[in-house]
Image (spheres, grey):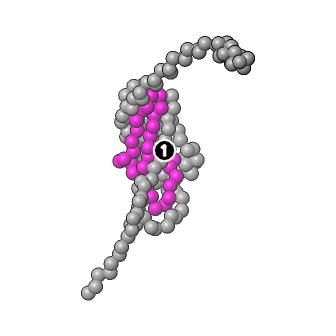
Amino acid sequence: MLKLLLAWALAQAQPAELPLPPPPEAPAPLRYLPVRVDAQVAAADSIPADARAGDMLVSIVDGQTLRVAVTVRHDELEHVNAADIRAWRAEDDLQIVIPLVSNTATPFEPRCCITHSQADLMLTLPAGLPTQVTVRTERPQLHVIGEQRLVPQH
């Protein structure tokens, strides 16, 4: 009986439950704003070696325009697809994607030597200048399931 009274006394001495803090506020949804891109791409052999040394240069043209010069490193069997360079703004980050396109007939050709291209981008921003610029170079994903070849017979 003493144990029962002791258990009851301990249960009564438990502090009252503390109220839970309020849940955190939901983050505001990101707004993605399109950015106008005017791009020019030059082959590595037309770029002086000292210009290829710098990887990326960002300069302010005016209150809504940035100029980004970036050196793109890629395989000799690829080239930069200037028409498909795209950019958007997510809050204070300007995202730029530079796509690469293969010059090979099949995806099975071996990779070769490394070369460089210089992309010169003029970006017109819809809402002021960003605090940072992120540049990504992308290759399209190739999911080859199989390949068949036939030799025409005469």
Q: Nearer the viewer, residue 36 or 11?
A: 11
Q: Nearer the viewer, residue 3 or 141?
A: 3
Q: State left or right for residue 101 relative to residue 16.
A: left
Secondary structure character of the magenta stretch overall: strand
Is 145 located above or below residue 18 in the figure?
below
Q: Which residue is mark 1?
A: 136
Identified at 49% across, 60% down, the residue is: 76
| The C terminus, quarter of image | bottom left
Determine the residue positioned at 41% across, 27% down.
29
Looking at this view, name the residue that lies furthest to the front: 1
Query: Is 63 included in the stretch rendered in magenta?
Result: no
Q: Residues within 10 Å of mark 1 (few under 14, many from 20)?
A: few
Placement of 87 over or under 116, stated as above or below? above
Q: What x and y, as percent, mark residue 133?
A: 49, 35
What is the magenta range? 71-100
In the depicted view, which residue is nearer to us: 42 or 70? 70
Confirm whether residue 63 shows in the render: no
Q: Amino acid at mark 1?
A: Arg
* SS of the residue under disc 1: strand
The residue drawn where x is 39% and y is 29% is: 31
Residue 152 location, quadrant: bottom left
Residue 103 at what x, y percent from top left? 41, 61
Quarter of the rendering containing residue 39 = top left
Q: Is residue 114 visible?
A: yes
Q: Quadrant of the N terminus?
A: top right
The front one of 149 and 34 is: 149
Going by the picture, which residue comes out furthest to the bottom?
154
